[in-house]
Amino acid sequence: MSSNKQHMWVFDEHDRELSGQLSDFLPDKIFDFHAHLYRTGDLNITGPGFLDEGPSEADVKVWKKYLSGFVGKERLRGGLFFPYPSVGCDVISANNYLIDRVKGESLSRGLVLATPGMATGELSAFLDNPLICGIKPYHIFSSEQPTFESSVNGYFPEWQWEIANHYGCVVMLHLVKKGAVADPDNLKEIRGMCSRYPNIKLVLAHAGRCFHWPNADGIKQLRGLENVWFDTSAICEPEAFMMILKEFGPRKLLWGSDFPVCMIKGRSVTAGDGFVWIDNGFCNWERSSFANPVVVGIESLRALRWACEETGLNGDDISDIFYNNAFGLLNVNNGTLSGTPENELLSRTQSLYQHAMHRIPGGTQLLSKRPEMMAPGKWPAYFREARGCEVWDLDGKHYYDMASNGIGACLLGFNDPDVNKALRRRINLGSMCTLNPPEEVELADLLCDIHPCAEQARFTRSGGEACAVAVRIARATTGRSVVAVCGYHGWHDWYLAANLGASDALQGHLLPGLNPVGVPGELRDTAFTFRINNRQELQSIIDRYGKRLAAVIMEPCRNEDPEPGFLEFVREATTKTGALLIFDEITIGWRLHFGGSHMKFGIIPDIAVFAKSLGNGVPTGAVIGTRAAMDGANISFISSTYWTESLGPAASVATLKKMEKINVPAHVELTGRSIMKSWESLAEKHQMPVETSGYPCLAHFRFNHKQSEKLRTIYTRLMLDRGFLAGLSVYPPIAHTPELIQLYHAAIDEVFGDIADIIKEGSAGRFPDNMTAHSGFARLL
């Protein structure tokens, strides 16, 4: 090329070649969330620059012309447009030009430039226009100098936040300062203002301005703000996108071209403690033997593609980034100004469950996760994303989990980064093989180190399996068949055999109504129940079946400490009769005490069983015990292919190592006490018939009322309306923060007040029976 300037505003064969490679990545429909429309005459730019080489007027047709080169004209559906900010810009004229050019573009919207010196009436007049959905503040208009070091307030003052909040505006914010989204003051301002003005839809331009990709580390500090989004505009490295996808998920990322910047030949590159633009002003491309530059728009798409592939996004996720997220945020639908019909938008989660009821017996794989157990027709059956203690359903509704947090499995919180790191390593290296995973040996050593009495370990992939394996081992080791049971230990035949008698022997052992249909009648008299603290019931089993008694399996505790001396009695009785003592620590283990509740009480079992929080949500289960007790595992056939995959033990090792470093029981106890205090104080305030019980780490309350089940359902429904998954029990994870507990307290205050009114009016009985939550196990259809 004879002139370096020929690279400006040109879409050449190199661009066409690379854009062709992106074709299979791009979805059928694209909405550009960051594009500028302008007349250079309004900008009053002095001196030569990039815009001089382009058209003097950039309207929607010009935008389509240039973007068609690398995304395809047939894909473009609309855009979010705003003027190009410049120091000498005639803001009013630029805004009016924008509005004029967006007219007739039914699927597009506009933002207006806002300056600190703009009159309130001027800004409001622009926002009254139905084509304008928000504002674009920019640092060059800041009252603080130099503007690149301006606070957010310097160019987006609080009075504009107030107006934007009133109108429910989209605000496109270009952060400055060297750290951009990682700057502590920027983060403080964003968190404070977004919390104070929740109706604002804040979009952090340029992925929080992470042209220097290490700044993306600040993105995680914005977690929990539901009114924050990010756009992709002009970012040419994948790391910032990957951080957003990791911390916020694909529904918070919006594709933007940054037209006309997308037409610059070159890219932004992280360098040292900042970044540089490798463009015509930085280098002479004619002297390069190894690179032909392409437009920034293509470089940004390549970075986004890499990030999407590395985070495993599917086609639906990518369509969200390029199209669906924008339309949902702007409430644009099929060329109208209205949003997606509410009944259509809200039907995804519930309609899928209705379909599942016909396809999957019972609708779900776990009784406790059936929506009917919480709030029929209201409780979301499915999640799309989960992080910490936050959950998003298929409709994008956000909830804080103040219920079971994965049925007690996620003690560290959902999507824990340390566990995920271990999983990524194992997945990248291969998770399944003809050979065995070394992580299972590391896990066995860890468990035996934590439990000095344990000498051996076997692994499963669920708690029910682990209990079944423990009982099989005990029977094989002792050569006996009878098992004494206290508590809930799963769904397997050996356990439900206790209900083969005339009565519901398992009544009171967590789940009532466990029908043993399908369990062979020949297993009758192989399992017998006793209740916690009831020495006489256990002694009766021992007196009658002592020589046949293989094991006593029980939870050392669940809701409260056992009576003094009871566990000692069980330990002594099993030793005397030659039976093995198995402690089921699946639910309470690690939560009440590191290593399990039996270590708190100082009672040593022959075998202990773990699952749930052992893998922090990754399928796993463990059976540990003395060498003598575990001997049966050497002579009984206990084997499964998927017990040899590597993800379960890898997650378990990572979970245990993290729990060794932080005092998880102390954290969840403190959180649980705060939660129980809220229940008690607010029940007193509203004169509610509420009784609390349980350990703080497994806190419960109940309505002491004849309509208790209906009140429970009403409570859950009202809490869902306020953005909380909530029932009568809370399994606190370490992801619960004091700030969240304050929000929870405020929601309960409102809900208890509403329920108190219902009780006073005597209207609970009018709540439909078919909408009342189920309790216990019953026929599923």
Image (tube, helix red, strand yellow):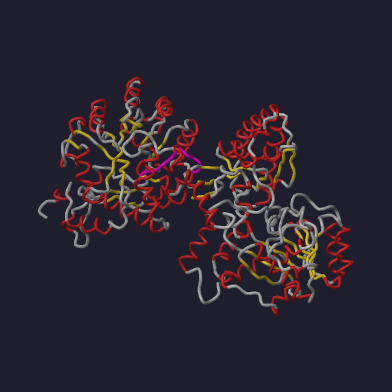
Magenta segment, which residues? Answer: 223-232
Establish if 532 lies above or below 443: above
Q: Is residue 580 visible?
A: no
Which quadrant: the N terminus? bottom left
Establish if 685 lies above or below 176: above
Q: Main secondary structure of the magenta part?
A: loop
Quick check: is 642 in the magenta stretch?
Answer: no
> Quick check: 169 left or right of 463?
left
Task: Tell me residue 709's x, y (percent).
Answer: 69, 41
* Residue at the spot 77% in from the left edge and 54% down from the top edge: 507
Establish if 569 lies above or below 139: below
Answer with the quarter of the image where residue 311 lies. bottom left
> Quick check: 419 left or right of 118?
right
> Quick check: 378 left or right of 685?
left
Task: Tell me residue 227's x, y (percent).
Answer: 45, 38
Q: Is residue 485 visible?
A: yes
Q: How many marks?
A: 0
Looking at the picture, tell me which residue is in the foreground, 54 or 693.
693
Q: Residue furthest left?
A: 2
Task: Tell me residue 62's x, y (percent).
Answer: 19, 41
Answer with the quarter of the image where residue 617 lies. bottom right
